[in-house]
Image (spheres, rainbow, N blue to C red):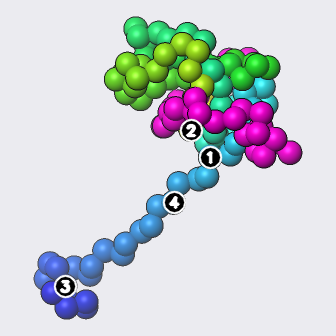
Amino acid sequence: MAENEEIFPGEAPAEKKVLRRAPAVPVKISDLKSDMGRVCVLGTVVSKNADIGSLIIDDGQASVLVLLSEMSYLEHLKEGQTVRVFGKVWGSSNEIEIQAELVQNFEKIDRELYNKVMFR
């Protein structure tokens, strides 16, 4: 099909739109605010709740409820495990939650070095 060729007679080809996702901002759990959008947080899994597909992570200063998009993620996570979570911040200033898009195993990461590099 030629570049200018019409797909349907009488209709112009649709323009391709490129949708870009906002970057996830690295932030400490204690610094989370409801208007932040996409964030990236590091913490230790404190507890898991299979009923609602969530977990609580703690970074040593604060904790946050993380809602998982896939219940099967819980099978691969264990309490005491260090994880990095990418997601969207939800809730009000009193009850912040993260709707997780991605949860990474960060067990082999040096947390002290990570914090030094990410939060100078």
Compared across the picture, whether 58 is left or right of 48 comes to right
On the image, the x and y values in percent for residue 98 come to 58, 28
- In this rendering, would 14 be left or right of 11? right
The residue tagged with tag 3: helix, strand or loop?
loop
In the picture, residue 2 is in which quadrant? bottom left
Q: Is residue 16 above or below residue 102?
A: below
Q: Is residue 84 above or below residue 8?
A: above
Q: From which residue to which does the magenta span run?
A: 92-120
User: Quick one: label 1, few (<14), some, or many (20+) residues within 10 Å?
Assistant: some
Residue on which disc 3 sits: 6
Q: CA distance from mark 2 to mark 1?
A: 7 Å
Comparing labels 3 and 1, the label whose residue is closer to the camera: 1
How far, Cα to Cα, is label 3 from label 4? 27 Å
Q: Is residue 33 visible?
A: no
Q: Which residue is mark 2?
A: 86
Please rate how many residues cluster around mark 4, counting C-alpha atoms within 10 Å: few if below 14, some from 14 to 19, many from 20. Answer: few
x 81%, y 41%: residue:
116
Q: Where residue 16 is drawn, which disc sits there?
A: none
Mark 2 or mark 1, earlier in chain: 1
Which residue in the protein does label 4 denote?
20
- Which element is circle 1 on? loop
In space, the residues marked 3 and 1 are separated at their CA atoms by: 39 Å
